[in-house]
Image: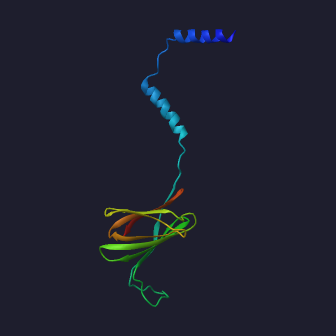
Amino acid sequence: MSQDRKIEEIIRLMQRDDSVDAPQDAVKWAKNLCLGRDRRPSLVRRIVAVLQADLLPNRVLAGERSASTSQSRQMFFTAGDYAVDLRIAGGRKSVGVKGQILGTGLENASVSLMGAEGSFETRADGTAMFDFNNVPAGDYVLTAKHNDVEIVIERVKL
């Protein structure tokens, strides 16, 4: 069969086509199936940190080597293979928060504080240290996120 005859046969079949379109909801469902396959799942390992130590200012602990007391509150959290050291200093209305994420892979992490008083964001440096200034006192959730790791510290009272 020649090329021209094949094309004519295809055109005749198309003209005689009496099939009906699929229902719109079935078409939408089928398209959504394909969209789901194209998306790559993002697996973020979310780790909730646990408070290990909460050292209040102006209090000396038994066995502490320092001759003076600290003017800042120190909180130490563990989160799987990571740890977070927080230093909180300031007054009743606003505080400064300095911290460091201990462990590898969270250098330059995005760090946020979110609470009823507002939300604040910063970026950790190359040694995973970060700080916030003039944060209103209140309860916050601190989140540090970089690549596929997210560390969450719930109910941080500043």
Residue extending farthest to the front is 4
Residue extending farthest to the right is 1
Residue extending farthest to the bottom is 67
State the count of labels: 0
- From where the camera sits, is residue 31 visible? yes
Write the residue at 56% across / 68% down.
Answer: 103
Q: Quadrant of the C terminus?
A: bottom left
Displayed quadrant of residue 147: bottom right
Classify residue 153 as left or right of residue 13. Answer: left
Write the residue at 52% across / 10% down.
Answer: 15
Q: Nearer the viewer, residue 80 or 93?
A: 93
96 is higher (above) or lower (below) than 114: below
Across and down, in percent, residue 47 comes to 49, 60
Q: Quadrant of the N terminus?
A: top right
Across and down, in percent, residue 113 comes to 40, 64
Residue extending farthest to the left is 93
Across and down, in percent, residue 61 comes to 44, 85
Across and down, in percent, residue 18 comes to 49, 11
Write the residue at 57% across / 63% down.
Answer: 105
Which of the colour schemes (rainbow, by chain, secondary structure, one colour) is used? rainbow
Displayed quadrant of residue 93: bottom left
Classify residue 89 as left or right of residue 39. Answer: left
- From where the camera sits, is residue 151 visible? no
102 is higher (above) or lower (below) than 66: above
